[in-house]
Amino acid sequence: QSVVTQPPSASGTPGQRVTISCSGSSSNIGNNYVYWYQQFPGTAPKLLIYGNSQRSSGVPDRFSGSKSGTSASLAISGLRSEDEADYYCATWDERLSGYVVFGGGTKLTVL
Amino acid sequence: EVQLVESGGGLVQPGRSLRLSCAASGFMFDDYAMHWVRQAPGKGLEWVSGISSKSHIIGYADSVKGRFTISRDNAKNSLYLQMNSLRAEDTALYFCAKDGYSSSSGEIDYWGQGTLVTVSS
């Protein structure tokens, strides 16, 4: 079980706005940047959002990230079929022996 | 173009060892921290280990601490993961990944395609 929690699934219809949450604590999200990754089946993850809300190069402005307290969110507006993928949040955890912790991932389905 | 190419995966018996390698190109390798991230079949991403640009700072997930050792050779633009005392639960696709900074930040901006490790008798 990850110390950072995401809903296992989310869904929406084309054109809708969907949000994916990422919940943690003061030792991780509360005091550190949050990153979001997109992964299609059989491929490597891709950095979508860094520094809580900055879009990585080439990422459409339909994708946006935010953080408040010990939670973060990824919002996708104008949902498209090609957005169907797994989405992971990640951050730094100050309690663990290591550094990086990923959320469990959210499978986004476009209905 | 940034390229990260993993090698060294395969089928190994429980309790045995394996060494993964990652050949990096297209960027100043000795300026950036590097990571190993794994993904068990049908599961999510799990950070395994990270190493700063000059190897001064190293970290491990609790699940591999004491069994895995990360290292890098900046002269060869290469990252390594020595995996000892392998367990069935170590079965996963192992990704080599580049950090956006010289110290591990969690901002992983490039990923390799992964090398599959299967631990089974």
Image (cartoon, coloured by chain):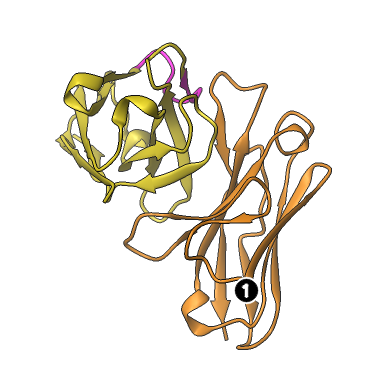
The location of residue B8, given as percent across then percent down, is 15, 34
At which x and y percent is residue B34? Answer: 38, 30
Amino acid type for the residue under numbered disc 1: Arg
**Image quarter of the C terminus of chain B:** top left
In the depicted structure, whether residue A7 falls above or below residue A18: above
Q: Secondary structure at mark 1?
A: loop
Whole-percent x and y of residue A9? Answer: 61, 66
Q: From the viewer's perspective, is B109 left or right of A61?
A: left
Q: Colour of chain B?
A: yellow
Magenta highlight on residue A91: no
Magenta stretch, overall SS: loop
Q: Which chain is orange?
A: A
- Residues A94 and B9: in front is A94
**Residue A27 shows in the view:** yes
Residue at the spot x=57%, y=86% of the render? A111
Mark 1, other Cα within 10 Å: few <14 / some 14–19 / many ≥20: few
Residue plotted at (34% across, 34% down): B90
Q: What stretch of residues is rendered in magenta? A: B59-67
Which of the chains bears the disc numbered 1? A
Picture quarter containing residue B12?
A: top left
Image-based side of B52 in relation to B70, left or right: right
Nearest to the observer: residue A65 or residue B19: A65
Q: Position of residue B44 (x, y in %)?
A: 48, 50
Please tell me which residue is depicted at 61% across the width and 22% down the height of the picture: A96
Q: Which residue is mark 1?
A: A62
Picture quadrant of residue A91: top right
Q: Is residue A1 visible?
A: no
